[in-house]
Image: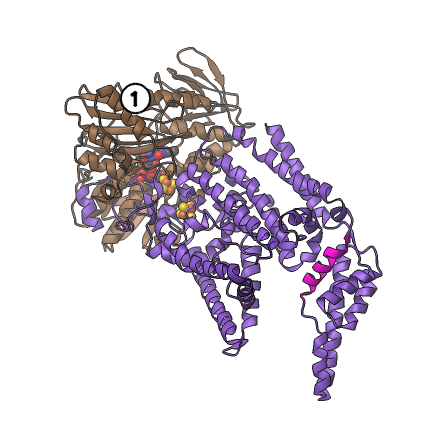
Chain colours: A purple, B brown
Amino acid sequence: MKIIKQSGLIIFLIGLATFIGIIFTGTFSLTQSELDTFIKEKGFKSEVIKTQLKNTIVENKDLNIFEFSSGVTTALETSNNHYNKLISKYNSEKNWAKKGEQYQYKISDKPHSLSFTLAKKAGKGFAAENTALAWFLTFGLGIIGALMFIIPDVILLGKPGIKNDGIFLNAATNRGWIGWFAFIFLVTFYILLYFYPDYIVNWVYLVDPISISISGNPAGQWFLYGFLYCVVMTVMAIRMYIKYRHNKYQILRTTSVLFFQIVFAFLIPEILVRFNKPWYDFKNAFPLDYDFFFQWNLKELLASGGFGLFILVWGIVLTIVIVPVMVYFFGKRWYCSWVCGCGGLAETLGDPYRQLSSKTLLSWRVERIIIHSVLIFVLVMTGFALYTFFTQKGVVLGIQTQTIKDIYGFLIGSIFAGVIGTGFYPIFGNRVWCRFGCPLAAYLGFVQRFKSRFRISTNGGQCISCGNCSTYCEQGIDVRAYAQKGENIVRSSCVGCGVCSAVCPRGVLKLENGPEKGRINPTEILLGNDVDLMELVNK
Amino acid sequence: MKHIVIIGNGISGVTAARHIRKNSDSKITIVSAETKYFFSRTALMYVYMGHMKFEHTQPYENWFWDKNNIELKEAFVGNIDTSKKILNFTNSETLTYDTLIIATGSKPNKFGWPGQDLEGVMGMYHKQDLEKLEKYAPDNKTCKRAVIVGGGLIGIELAEMLRSRKIPVTFLVRETSFWNGVLPAQESKMINNHIKEHHIDLRLNTNLKEIKADENGRVKSIIIEETGEEILCDVVGLTAGVTPNIDFLKDSGIELGRGVKVNRFLETNIKDIYAIGDCAEQHEAIGQRRNIEAVWYTGRMMGETVAQTICHKKTAYKPGHWFNSAKFLDLEYQTYGWVFSEKGKKENEAYFQWQHPVDLKCITISFDKNTHQFLGINTFGIRMRHEIFDKWLTENQPIEHVLEYLSDANFDPEFYKLHEAEILAKFNKENNTNILLKKKSWKRIFAR
Ligand SMILES: Cc1cc2nc3c(=O)[nH]c(=O)nc-3n(C[C@H](O)[C@H](O)[C@H](O)COP(=O)(O)OP(=O)(O)OC[C@H]3O[C@@H](n4cnc5c(N)ncnc54)[C@H](O)[C@@H]3O)c2cc1C
Ligand code: SF4
Ligand code: SF4
């Protein structure tokens, strides 16, 4: 068994190394006619970029992706610089007609997105041409290796039960060098994904066939991400199944998030695209789905006929009715731990890191400030966006709607939710995004705290203050602080993962939905002591 | 301002301090030689096992004490001058008090075995024991085998700890079956099997004769009393119970038995001196409880109580219905009310028992043969609601009531398999009754 596990690790690492290595393979170039078609499609009028691109990516046949990328981005920059100069020149000459003419030559595409689109057409080499083999050597080996590493635990972990031995003695799970390595890997991955998609175009080639078979289109970087997400979640869900095989709550919950990720977040949207409908994830509720009320989305929905209208109504009802009503009955866990994709990744890939979240009072304070600021931010931004949509005015109170949307998308949508939210798992624990950033979680939290039947009941006086519950709470809730006072836990941030209850060695905690009365039960003297005294002090 | 000094920063001393602070502005000082900050002794095992870091065992952040104006003094009290109300520390400092609470806890028993003080022999009580274990048994290369002497709750925890680092363990238990002085045979047997399944070399009916040293004065082996067998080992864990940690009080004039003698108000024979927690010994036992109760909960309850008395609400220590819990490796145990082992139970007490055919789950309900009054329950592998059982005990409900409403009491996580129906069916069959299981009702659960 041990040998299988160790070979699994080696195979996984080979897969990972190939995966990283494959970025550097292949050559990228376009033929003149391909370039011409592309420029026509895009409607670029700039002559400068035409010649620039010709000189670099058409003339040179063996560019690697980095040279290719720099060729394209420089071409774009040179072209825009050229016309900017003309603009300021005519400006100083007060030649308004000429000045106005120049604007049509400017290109507003993001450099690395443009480069990605071109690279996607231009690639030759291992990933682009031997896709099946390349897939096997990366994804295939990764999956096989990971499963070989994980599955022997059925036997190696021994009898079913809580198996947290050695977690704080292990470099991977205690911010040791493996943890830091994973951190660097994840952060780099997200930076590439969000900001330099062209650098990872070879990865996208690997999933082209899969994308074509589902949606009919070749893959983009987001298809790659969606596919990778599903693969990682599935593999790590198997780990969850083994680790918590004695705990049915964990098994059902894991199955549920996995189902919603694969079917709702991955398959259905891609299939919608196949039928020329808008890409839509039916479970992704506003404000987590922050661009739902953006002009382009509303326009697209309204342009897609009855189906688009249905999505629009669904999206609004989901946020305003379904989400809070469900939170009333079941707590926010129904979304955060049973449905949500971010939660799903945190509970599968992130589970090994849950103990790293900070439990200090200070971090609780910081958490409340940040998460509520994000909520306000997203609401203000949506207000602006809707104003723009209805009035068609791009400027509100002297602020460009577009600017504020861009800032949100960059800071919150990309940096916070992706780079920090997932990249920091190995350092700050999983659920960094869910705890500190997610505006939907903040909204659900209000409902959970003030109007819900959900609570974690504390079992009378049974707590021995051991601290397992607090240590393994991914949301950084000091569960023990309540349990040792005999007090129920009704914190807005609790995502109902149920792990505090699972790890408690004395059976003190139970997640349950019950009457609102008696849900909050402050106590000073715990059950088990003199009844008169309890009444005297607890009143 | 009155100065209240508490010796010992365990659960009892700290609970007392917290509750005194809620009700008074007196100056409070907690003295401890073990650690500056309060930590949970019950969690020591998890630190060695790597489930937690030591800091996780501290229930309060370090600023808590300052914020609540509770002073912490790290020193060992050598003796007390009760006439001058002065504590003399072993580092020759002193501290005067107006009110003194002794909450010094326990220390591991040593029964005078030859070799019991050798290097590599240790108890498992204080933080220093944990550090010693880390030193002598960091892995299974340094410690090729460990022998644990004494089959109680701490013994089995120590065995689990060592097994988490794959260290071979021999576990010497004096009784014929694990903890069968406390547990009914059904449960005790289940644990015996469970221990063996965890690859622990369990030796029942076995006593320690002596511990042998190598040429460096370190543990080399132990000899078994019954067979004379020698077992080579690098570490010996002594976990044969605990005794109150009160040697420093010998000449203080405070009345001592095995522990510090106290009345129901937790007062000692000397005015303004109280004793609570593991080290306190009641003159007369309360109900069926022992005179010295060395568990977490009673320490906490005595702390809660003594604080009221000190803050001028003189309150007797009146613990409610007995409850307890433990975990034997993967096996969770809870108990409410009194269930005695076959050896300990009285003539009028009868059992109703149920055991799952495959899973490690079983219950024993103890009830009065004549009146059918419910006396207590042991559950293994099933969690139960403390509040419900406390209520049933107070109401003197018969066993039939308990079984009928058993669904209200289940505290297992959601979606767990429920066994109330099977349990009730067995009872009905054995007793020719026809009790129908009531569905769980929130209304009943919250009716208080
Ligand atoms: C490994 C282990 C596991 C346990 N598990 C459980 C469990 O699961 N459930 C349960 O109910 N109970 C359990 N117990 C028992 C429980 O921990 C004790 O009953 C409880 O900690 C006693 O608390 P206390 O406040 O009376 O004393 P202690 O916690 O022992 O604290 C006394 C403190 O006083 C200090 N002290 C003593 N003498 C002096 C002196 N002269 N000068 C200065 N300081 C001094 C000691 O160093 C110590 O720090 C366990 C105990 C151990 C060791
Ligand atoms: S309190 Fe418990 S259920 Fe809630 S998030 Fe923390 S560990 Fe999960
Ligand atoms: S894990 Fe259980 S016993 Fe330990 S502190 Fe938390 S609630 Fe209390």
Which SS type dominates the magenta stretch?
helix
- Magenta run includes residue A110: yes
Amino acid residing under circle 1: Pro
**Which sits in the foreground, B415 or A343?**
B415
In this picture, is B230 found above or below A359?
above
Res. A531 visible in picture: yes
Mark 1 falls on what kind of element? Answer: loop
Please name the residue shown 55% across and 62% down the image. A304
Q: Which residue is mark 1?
A: B184
Q: Quadrant of residue B350?
A: top left
Residue B149: x and y in percent read 40, 22
Range of the magenta residues?
A109-123
Badge 1 density bin: few <14, some 14–19, many ≥20, Cα 10 Å? many
Q: Quadrant of ligand 3?
A: top left
In this picture, is B80 found above or below B61?
above
Q: Is residue A334 left or right of residue B11?
A: right
In this picture, is B366 found above or below A185?
above
Please name the residue shown 30% across and 26% down the image. B423
Q: Chain of mark 1?
A: B
Residue B135: x and y in percent read 50, 33
Count numbered badges in the picture: 1
Residue A73: x and y in percent read 73, 65
In the picture, the quarter occupied by the N terminus of chain A is top right
In this picture, is B383 found above or below A420?
above
Q: Residue furthest top?
A: B227
